[in-house]
Amino acid sequence: MGDNKIVLKDLKSIYEHKVGLIYIDPPYNRGDDFIFYKDSQKHDEWIEKMKTVIVEMKGFLKEDGSIWISIDDSEMAYLKVCCDSIFGRENFVSTIVWQKRNTRENRKIFSNNHEYILIYAKDIKKFKKKRNLLPATQELLNRYKNPDNDPRGPWQSVTLSVQAGHAVESQFYSIESPTGKIHNPPKGRCWIYNEERMQQEISNNNIWFGSDGNGVPRLKKLLVNTKLGIVPETLWDSNFAGTTKDAKKELLDLNIYDEDIFDTPKPEQLLYRIIQIATNKDDLILDCFLGSGTTAAVAHKLGRDYIGIDIDERTFKYACERLKKVCQGENGGISNEVQWSGGDNYQVCKWN
């Protein structure tokens, strides 16, 4: 527990370049004042404070690390420009639009149902190699079949032709099917292999001519050789990443909810998706606006090491109580999904 600007400076010598993921859910500067923190600063003061903290955090990131920042419309555009100046526009990864609520708000001009998550990488090329795919859906798995009883198992067929803009002469030729039918690449396209390589693939049973042997040749993509997964999208609906209502229920079930402090907590499902995409087992996670402790709780359940910082003593007490229950095996949030049954421990420090 302590002021993140001070704590981060003290921790930097230990954890510089060692953090795989930073997630923060800072005050949004929406003009609301709560009992335990002020959310109505002058814009210039707010953006300067954010810049100071983000600059400090950048030094903690590994070369393939990333920072994810929750924000809403009030300051999102300005925060992005700020982060562009810190990380470089070339290291901007994307903006997630998260459906924070799935009910209509009728008291305002528009029912505001979303927030944003800004994503920046320390080095976008290295983060791109590290970024994890999401687990394959059953719909994707259903595409793999085995109509020819290939001993290597299920497969799906993909096109053998590509656009001819950068083709060489050896990519233009005719292919004879097992029944003698001649196939040429479609107009404006060419085969992906030269003729010698194509004949090798046919001999190795890697080319499919359809069940009757007359079809347009297609490449067999074997399930056994495929890294299955789905590239993450930027629109996260409530089914995929939960809502603030889910988050409140998670805290209520733990008997630690206090709306004076936790007006808009984040659901475990949201942090689960972020950690799933941005980290591996050996990564350290940092959240210096810890709040209700969602980041630490999810990181703990996923077997990641983590550092959480919060300045308010009462808020920090709630986060610690939550982690105590996580260690004891509480079954809320993502517990059932990841088969969490408790274990491990955490350390608490009060910064002086």
Image (cartoon, rainbow, N blue to C red):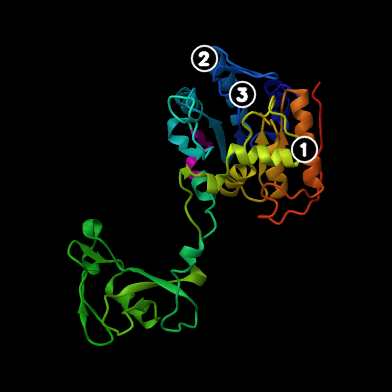
Q: Which of disc 2 and disc 1 is earlier in sequence? A: 2
* Crowdedness near tag 1: few (<14), some (14–19) or many (≥20) residues, C-alpha within 10 Å: few
Q: Say left or right for 313 vs 205.
A: right
The residue identified by callout 3 is 53
Residue in front for this viewpoint, 225 or 157: 157
Report how far apart the C-alphas of labels 1 and 2 lie in the structure: 36 Å
Amino acid at dot 1: Asn
Q: Residue at x 77, y 40 (%)?
A: 323
SS category of the residue bearing label 2: helix
Bounds of the magenta segment: 113-126
Tag 3 and tag 1, C-beta contact below 8 Å: no
Q: Nearer the viewer, mark 3 or mark 2?
A: 2
Q: Amino acid at mark 2?
A: His
Q: Which residue is mark 2?
A: 43
Q: Position of residue 288 (x, y in %)?
A: 67, 29
Q: Position of residue 238 (x, y in %)?
A: 53, 44
**Looking at the image, which residue sits at the far left?**
187
| Residue 105, visible in the rendered structure | yes
Q: Quadrant of the C terminus?
A: top right
Residue at image x 20%, y 67%? 186
Q: In the drawing, does residue 168 fall left or right of residue 78?
A: left
Taking 176 as reference, is 107 above or below it?
A: above
Mark 1 sits on what residue?
255
Disc nearer the start of the sequence (3/1): 3
On whether residue 114 falls in the magenta region, the answer is yes
Pointer 3 or 2: first along the chain:
2
* x then y, percent, for residue 33: 62, 17
Residue 266, numbered label: none
Relative height, residue 133 to residue 34 (above, below): below
Residue at the extreme bottom: 179
